[in-house]
Image (cartoon, rainbow, N blue to C red):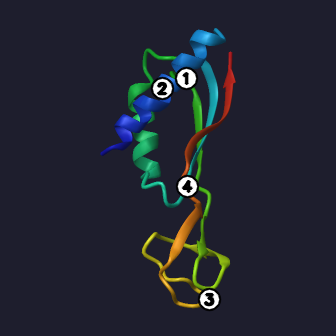
């Protein structure tokens, strides 16, 4: 369950932000975890809730968006939608795909009190 270490990394980012721009606590946190990021959304949500007590995340509402994945096909030179890194190009059937979105894990919005 690497989501626990990811949650710890997210908390560190929030605490570093708190050091630079002091705030009491996080009211709302919106994350983005792409479909190809390898993150189990429910496990990440559970991990964030597990580490929240006693931190700036305690009592924060958390939303996690999961943007769809896309890739550039090197054989047919088109951007195509994919579901996993193992997919074939839906246009030409080739496997030379370079993911262009859906790999990200990032903090998108932070509301603090």
Number of the front mark, 3 or 1: 3
- SS class of the residue under badge 1? helix
| Mark-to-mark CA distance, 4 and 3 | 22 Å
| Mark-to-mark CA distance, 2 and 3 | 41 Å
Label annotation for residue 34? 4
Q: Is residue 21 above or below residue 38?
A: above
Residue 89 drawn at (x, y percent): 55, 83
Name the N-terminal-most of marks 3 and 1: 1
Label annotation for residue 91? 3
**Residues at marks 2 and 3 touching, judged by CB atoms closer than 8 Å:** no
Residue 66 drawn at (x, y percent): 58, 55
Label annotation for residue 11? 2
- SS class of the residue under badge 2? helix
- Disc 1: which residue: 14
Q: Can the viewer see residue 23?
A: no
Q: Residue at x 36, y 35 (%)?
A: 5
Label annotation for residue 35? none
Packing grade of label 3 (10 A; few <14, some 14-19, many >=20) is few
- SS class of the residue under badge 3? loop
| Mark-to-mark CA distance, 3 and 1 | 42 Å
Name the N-terminal-most of marks 4 and 3: 4
**Residues at marks 4 and 2 touching, judged by CB atoms closer than 8 Å:** no
Q: Residue at x 41, y 38 (%)?
A: 6
């Amino acid at each position: 369950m690497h989501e626990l270490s990811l949650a710890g990394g997210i908390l560190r980012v929030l605490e570093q932000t708190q050091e630079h721009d002091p705030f009491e606590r996080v009211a709302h946190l919106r994350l983005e975890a792409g479909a190809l990021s390898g993150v189990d959304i429910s496990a990440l949500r559970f991990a964030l809730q597990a580490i929240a007590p006693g931190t700036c995340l305690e009592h924060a509402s958390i939303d996690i968006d999961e943007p769809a994945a896309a890739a550039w096909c090197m054989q047919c030179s088109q951007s195509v939608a994919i579901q996993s890194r193992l997919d074939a190009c839906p246009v030409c059937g080739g496997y030379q795909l370079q993911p262009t979105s859906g790999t990200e894990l990032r903090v998108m919005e932070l509301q603090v009190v």
